[in-house]
Image: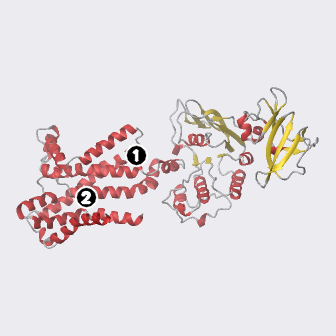
Amino acid sequence: MTAVVILVTVIPIAVLITQGAPKFGQALSAPGAGHALAVTVESGSLALLVIFILGLPTAYYLRYIRSPAFKRFVAVVLVLALLMPPLVLGLVLAYVLAPATASGAILSQWQAASNSFPALTLAEVYEALPYFVLTAWSAISAIPKAWEEDAWALHKSPWQTFRFVLWPASRPGLVTATALAWARIVGAFGAPVVVAYHPTALPVQIWITLEEAGLPQALSLALWLVLVGLPLPGFLTWRQGTAS
Amino acid sequence: MNLYAQFSAPGFLHGHSEWPAGMHALMGPSGSGKTTLLRSLAGLGSTLATIGLKDSIWQGPSHDFLPAYLRPLAYVPQRPSLIPFRTIGQQIRWIQPDSTVPLVTPPGLALSDFWDRLPHTLSGGQQQQIALVRALATTQPVLLLDESLSQVDHIQRQRIMHWLFETRPASWILFSTHQLSEALTFSDTVTIIYEGKVFPTRTPEDCLIHPDTPETARLLGYCGSFALDNCHHLLIHPDYLLIGAFPDKGEVLEADVTSIPGPSPLERTWRAVYHNQVVQWRAPHAARETTAQALTLLRAPIVSFTLNDH
């Protein structure tokens, strides 16, 4: 059974490498492809930064929430956001960012609310934030409360305790959360295709390539996407596997 | 100039206690509330109690709750409390960054043997001793030890307790234990806790002479009582009696005393009958006689409750 599972999971990777590799080098020279790769890395980095700024304090804050009802509420909201079909998310974002709405109007003052770099980044944030928060929250919550109390009862402030105990203890979980978020950001298609067809990021560019140049070219570009998005989670999983 | 705590409903603990500077034992059976009391003092427990040290009130009905890390104390729990992913040296240097300040270590513990090791490579008893060193490194005036040496072997534990008692590395040392001899030997006062009730703090001697209730009398080692009349009962303590009549040593009680070996190879089970009342106890084989017609009581408190119904 395990062999079947491994075979089934390996097939896509194998096909991608064997079929994508021959034209791998040329894939980026196609019109728009190189630009799409740059847009993906730039908007993705910015999206990841936004996710850190929003998600890290949230994940730590949720550790200290005592009300089980509030915790459940937050968990349900995050899971719903996580499981929301990306296309639906894109439609909702498009509606919110439309020039007719207040948020769209405010954003338009500065830059186009849709089909813009901020819109793309926002779409990526929406797709990846729940992954990050849920993973980071569960990692941080798994740290025993007693570790903190023991430090407080040795005359150490919460900030000193955070730096010496909590942060190092939560780092492996945060790295996993980051890897998941990055893979999700880089692969974001459903929401960007609605709100940010331009500037075109790699997933949308692959779709365009498929439409215009055919499957082989699209597969080559897809290999690029996988190379950008997956080494980090792959490496981390490998390292965690050897650690345990 | 005391450390004090007042517990009231609806908390589990109730009662009031006060500890002057010194070394103090908290004694009670498992589950009686010793940990609850120490955690409250440390600022990790109930917010209902009123707790303070000298003029500073740490918590109370009309006072803000002073968080654990602002209280001038170090608390060592019974469970393993070393940070699992930091070496012993890192943890101690975290508490006391100034390496010119000499570390206070109990006898029989070579800290350098453990300095670069992670906690999981140490035995439970070694971890507990390191946790004590780490707490002492805080140099706080109040040290709370919650059965903190429970996994340390008996001889080394006695050594450390004796060292704490003699050198007083902290102004206030409160330790919880369910071992009677430890509580009576290494303390200036004993606070008995039974089912959440905190009894007044008293000297070990005073505690022994005036047990408050049947429960505290049993905790203090009394094994039974003989009724003198309806409201006066003579408490019997196996460590404060002689087999036979020795009028110059204490009060002689004409009782029919017999003994049989066991249950352990080190003990005999003794049985004294006085006016049809029976008291049984265990004692080492040291007695010269194995039967006698009298008991000499070296210490015989007369109280208003009986111990024989339990």
Count numbered badges in the picture.
Answer: 2
Q: Is residue B153 above or below residue A106?
A: below
Q: Amino acid at mark 2?
A: Ala
Circle 1 — which element?
helix
Q: Which mark is residue A63?
A: 1
Q: Position of residue B17 (x, y in %)?
A: 65, 35
Q: Amino acid at mark 1?
A: Arg
Which residue in the rendered view is the most extreme toward the front?
A1
Circle 2 — which element?
helix
Coloring applied to the structure: secondary structure
Q: Which quarter of the rendering shows the N terminus of chain A?
A: bottom left
Q: Position of residue A229 (x, y in %)?
A: 24, 62
Q: Would you identify the image quadrant in which residue B198 lies?
A: top right
Sequence-wise, which precedes: disc 2 or disc 1?
1
Kindly report the distance in space between the C-alpha atoms of the residues bearing marks 2 and 1. 25 Å
Letter of the chain that mark 1 sits on in the rendering: A
Which residue in the rendered view is the most extreme toward the left?
A212
Q: Is residue A228 among what the camera can see?
A: yes
Q: Which quarter of the rendering shows the C terminus of chain A?
A: bottom left
Which residue in the rendered view is the most extreme toward the top?
B230
Q: Is residue B61 above or below residue B118?
A: above
Q: Would you identify the image quadrant in which residue A4 lies?
A: bottom left
Q: Residue at x 6, y 64 (%)?
A: A213
Nearest the eye: B236 or B38? B236
Q: Position of residue B95 (x, y in %)?
A: 54, 55
Query: Dot 2, crowdedness within 10 Å: few (<14), some or many (≥20)?
Result: many
Q: Which mark is residue A183?
A: 2
Query: Dot 1, crowdedness within 10 Å: few (<14), some or many (≥20)?
Result: some
Letter of the chain that mark 2 sits on in the rendering: A
Q: Is residue A114 left or right of residue B246?
A: left
Nearest the eye: B90 or B102? B90
Q: Position of residue B22 (x, y in %)?
A: 69, 44
